[in-house]
Image (tube, rainbow, N blue to C red):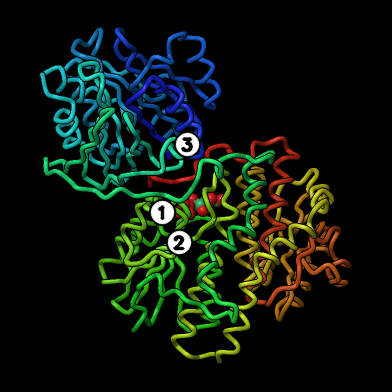
């Protein structure tokens, strides 16, 4: 939540900062701003409410010399303290006129928990506040120290020692115009390395057009950037040697490549994302090889999956597969609950933390909570070098490439595929199923990229009719059973987050215990029937909704006559081994949510109130 970016180097600062913010807009889009070291004029800020284009327009109008700027910081905001407004937009400044002393500018991602006390204290010392944000206290504390003659790095160290909470900050001072100082505690920060220029950002995506070489800044570290140097130290002044990290994502992957929206592009990238995630981990006989993890799986008696949102739904599918194939008990916990649950476990517990971004605060905290009982931790993430990768003993990387749309799509399918690999690995070690049975599942998994491709083909031109069922809808009910229940949950989440229609995902058999009261002509039922043992049961539950006036969209095989009988529209999925069928059954639900939202004229890539990485509690 919130993205920060910084640049020091050549006369292309504004271009780099704006491109960086554009690639970080998924982290928040309530407002955006830049602080620039203007040659001979000092620090100047420009801030605008709303999408980045507003800021770009304002910069263009305000300056005809912005191409001369060499140093600056930028911010894109997801509001925590104070509504989205120009006053609350970052960067925040301190010092300068009328406060006196050199002007400083601050961009911040995180939450300062003791901001109210600090605000009071600063007010008593005569500081005037211009915003309702927690961040502004940083600007004044910093300005006070700079005015007292402290160099920027020392002033920031002194300021940070007063703060409680989480932060990644980048600051600049009129006194040291060729320098940016940045630090982090709990919120992400990377430094990008260039020739005669250096960069910083909340995430590598921001800088891929400029560099692929990065240094990760760890908790409690401070980085000082000039055009020719990057120095990292601890807050206690010890120098840090950090190895350069090269990422294999490219700037091209961040483009729309002819698609109207990132979400649609990412739905269509799913076959390739699955292919990349499975490559090298599953041989032609369907035998899994996770030796790359170099992880000790021996003695594991129980698994706890911790995750949030869509990743939690992937975890539920992981539970189903691990319990079925490996006969190991799995608990799936919402990370924001688990972290405070005083969780129970011991060294035989494997904690699997799933997070696309690898930086979700609650998921990281849940991992920390599990350390209390000595858990071994395996991370499933899409983001190389993310915070989660540094907290886990081993990392099973999903290789979906960067996901820009706020609604997770390709990262969900690859998380599910990664969990199937894990289930097969554990099953192989525990020996409950025969090699042949496991190899059947493995071979099915190997074919999943082509099956998802087939699903996309079958659905081409078919979703419009289903969107018609949603005309005048005031809510929706998504039903599934067994392994298709998490698919129903995911379908409901996709619909509500991008179309703003209330939607419930429910186990079909539980529907009569309450939610059936919702059912009428304005509450379509989306029935994830699939095939297999529970299909008949789900079908009879759907019949019960039809008897009460529901209009039904069935996710089923094209030739499923019973589905065709109960449903207004069938969204077809190809044949797939039962346990793996969530991989294909999810696709029509993603497309349904997408097209319903488009029909309502909404921005599917940037739904209101949301941010892609939830880095605050
Ligand atoms: C929904 C969505 C969110 C995320 C959740 C966890 O489409 O994207 O529910 O799944 O915020 O994010 P990560 O996976 O980054 O931990």
Q: Residue at x 41, y 36 (%)?
A: 3
- Element marked by disc 1: loop
Q: Residues within 10 Å of mark 3 (few under 14, many from 20)?
A: some
Q: Residue at x 60, y 46 (%)?
A: 497
For the residues bearing labels 3 and 1, Cβ distance under 8 angstroms: no
- Element marked by disc 3: loop
In the rendered view, would you say 367 is above or below 521? below
- Element marked by disc 2: strand
In the rendered view, would you say 358 is above or below 422? above
Relative horizontal placement of residue 306, taking residue 564 as reference (left or right): left
Q: Residues within 10 Å of mark 1 (few under 14, many from 20)?
A: many
For the residues bearing labels 1 and 2, Cβ distance under 8 angstroms: yes
- The disc, 3 or 1, on the residue closer to the chain's N-terminal end is 3
- Of badges 3 and 1, the one in the foreground is 3
Residue 159 picture quarter: top left
For mark 3, what is the residue?
Answer: 209
Q: Residue at x 56, y 58 (%)?
A: 412
- Of badges 2 and 3, the one in the foreground is 3
Q: Residues within 10 Å of mark 2 (few under 14, many from 20)?
A: some
Question: Which label belongs to residue 384?
Answer: 1
User: What's the distance in space between the residues labelled 3 and 1, CA to CA?
Assistant: 17 Å
For mark 2, what is the residue?
Answer: 397
Relative horizontal placement of residue 273, taking residue 70 as reference (left or right): right
Ligand 1 lies under 8 Å from the Cβ of mark 1: no
For the residues bearing labels 2 and 3, Cβ distance under 8 angstroms: no
- The disc, 2 or 3, on the residue closer to the chain's N-terminal end is 3
């Amino acid at each position: 939540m919130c993205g920060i970016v910084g640049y020091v180097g050549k006369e292309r600062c504004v271009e780099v900062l704006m491109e960086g913010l554009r690639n970080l807009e998924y982290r928040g889009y309530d407002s955006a701003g830049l602080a620039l070291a203007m040659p001979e004029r000092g620090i100047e800020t420009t801030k605008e409410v709303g999408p980045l284009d507003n800021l770009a327009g304002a910069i263009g109008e305000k300056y005809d010399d912005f191409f001369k700027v060499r140093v600056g910081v930028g911010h894109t905001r997801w509001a925590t303290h104070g509504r989205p407004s120009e006053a609350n937009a970052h960067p925040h400044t301190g010092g300068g006129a009328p406060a006196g002393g050199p002007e400083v500018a601050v961009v911040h991602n995180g939450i300062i928990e003791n901001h109210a006390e600090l605000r009071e204290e600063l007010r008593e010392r005569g500081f005037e506040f211009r915003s309702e944000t927690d961040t502004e206290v940083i600007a004044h504390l910093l300005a006070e120290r700079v005015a007292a003659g402290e160099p920027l790095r020392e002033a920031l160290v002194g300021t940070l020692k007063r703060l409680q909470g989480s932060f990644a900050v980048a600051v600049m001072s009129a006194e040291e115009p060729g320098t940016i100082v940045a630090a982090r505690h709990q919120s992400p920060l990377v430094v990008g390395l260039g020739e005669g220029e250096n960069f910083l950002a909340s995430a590598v995506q921001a800088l891929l057009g400029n560099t692929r070489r990065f240094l990760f800044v760890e908790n409690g570290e401070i980085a000082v950037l000039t055009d020719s140097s990057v120095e990292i130290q601890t807050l206690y002044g010890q120098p840090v040697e950090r190895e350069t990290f090269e990422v294999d994502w490219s700037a091209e992957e961040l483009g729309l490549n002819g698609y109207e929206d990132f979400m649609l592009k990412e739905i269509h990238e799913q076959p390739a994302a699955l292919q990349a995630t499975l490559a090298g981990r599953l041989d032609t006989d369907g035998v899994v090889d996770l030796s790359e993890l170099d992880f000790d799986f021996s003695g594991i008696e129980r698994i706890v999956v911790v995750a949030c949102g869509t990743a939690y739904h992937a975890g539920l599918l992981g539970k189903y597969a691990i319990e079925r194939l490996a006969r190991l008990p799995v608990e799936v916990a919402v990370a924001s609950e688990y972290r405070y649950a005083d969780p129970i476990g011991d060294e035989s517990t494997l904690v699997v933390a799933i997070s696309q971004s690898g930086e979700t605060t609650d998921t990281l905290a849940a991992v920390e909570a599990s350390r209390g009982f000595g858990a071994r931790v395996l991370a499933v993430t899409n983001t190389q070098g993310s915070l989660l990768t540094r907290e886990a003993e081993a990392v099973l990387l999903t290789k979906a490439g960067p996901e820009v749309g706020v609604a997770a799509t390709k990262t969900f399918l690859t998380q599910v595929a990664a969990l199937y690999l894990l289930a097969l690995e554990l099953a192989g070690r525990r020996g409950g199923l025969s090699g042949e049975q496991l190899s059947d599942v493995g071979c099915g998994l190997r074919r999943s990229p082509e099956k998802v491709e087939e699903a996309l083909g079958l659905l081409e031109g078919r979703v419009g009719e289903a969107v018609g069922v949603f005309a005048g809808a005031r809510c929706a009910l998504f039903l599934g059973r067994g392994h298709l229940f998490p698919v129903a949950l995911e379908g409901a989440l996709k619909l509500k987050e991008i179309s703003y229609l209330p939607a419930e995902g429910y186990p079909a058999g539980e529907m009569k215990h309450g939610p059936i009261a919702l059912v009428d002509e304005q509450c379509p039922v989306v029935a994830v029937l699939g095939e297999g043992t529970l299909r008949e049961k789900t079908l009879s539950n759907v019949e019960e909704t039809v008897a009460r006036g529901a209009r039904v969209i069935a996710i089923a095989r094209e030739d499923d006559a019973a589905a065709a009988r109960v449903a207004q529209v069938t969204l077809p999925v190809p044949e797939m081994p039962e346990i793996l069928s969530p991989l294909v059954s999810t696709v029509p639900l993603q497309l349904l949510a997408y097209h319903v939202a488009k029909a309502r004229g909404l921005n599917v890539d940037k739904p209101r109130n949301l941010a892609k990485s939830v880095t605050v509690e």
